[in-house]
Image (cartoon, grey):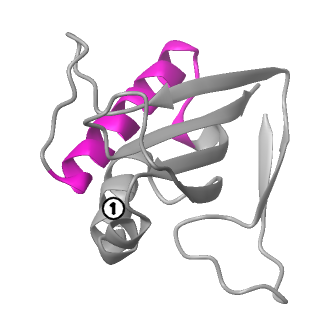
Amino acid sequence: MSTERVNPPDLSPPTGFSHAVVATGSRVVFLAGQTALDSDGKVVGESLPEQFERALTSLLTALAAAGGTPADLARVTVYATDVAAYRAQAAELGAIWRKLAGRTYPAMAVVGAVRLWDEAAMVELDGFAVLP
């Protein structure tokens, strides 16, 4: 598999994401939305960063089980129940991303949501990856 991150100079410089990802490979993995659920199906974490870390860990666990790595992620969507809080804590959330997934960023979007499937969840991540 090969990926090329495309960040045109005519667009605002990306911080923590890529404007476009061109991926070639033979397997596409679609990753279901992950919240901060533990193995018993209960939402864990009292803060947005705690829940973000758990949701990202779950997303990466599903990806690894399918044979992928964070570098294979082509697209991730973040659904947040409080976009203002997400923006206010972006530096901390970015540090969590770098710790777990590195600095190879997929194309990303953050979308505000009134609520998520798990009522106590503050954030959910889904995406897809392209594997060799």
State yes or no: residue 13 in magenta. Answer: no
Residue at the left extreme, as displayed: 46
Residue at the spot x=33%, y=61% of the render? Answer: 93
Residue 100 vertical placement versus 16 (above, below): above
Q: Is 38 situated left or right of 65 in this image?
A: left
Query: Which residues make up the magenta segment?
Result: 47-70
Q: Quadrant of residue 91?
A: bottom left
Residue 74 vertical placement versus 33 (above, below): below
- Which of the image's four quarters has the N terminus? top right
> Badge 1 local density, few (<14 within 10 Å), some, or many (20+)?
some
Residue at the front extreme, as displayed: 114
Residue at the top extreme, as displayed: 40
Q: Is 37 situated left or right of 87 in this image?
A: left
Residue 110 place in picture, x, y as percent: 55, 59
Residue at the spot x=22%, y=28% of the render? Answer: 43
Residue 22 vertical placement versus 31 (above, below): below
Q: Is 119 situated left or right of 108 in this image?
A: left
The residue carrying mark 1 is 93
Q: Is 48 situated left or right of 6 in this image?
A: left
- Which of the image's four quarters has the C terminus? top right
Residue 25 place in picture, x, y as percent: 84, 29
Q: Main secondary structure of the magenta part?
A: helix
Q: What amino acid is found at the position of numbered circle 1 in the picture?
A: Leu
Residue 8 place in picture, x, y as percent: 83, 79
Residue 29 place in picture, x, y as percent: 69, 22
Q: How many marks?
A: 1
Residue at the spot x=53%, y=24% of the render? Answer: 63
Query: Which structural element holds mark 1?
Result: helix
State yes or no: residue 51 in magenta. Answer: yes
Instruction: In this rendered view, identify the residue nearer to me: 15 or 89.
Output: 89
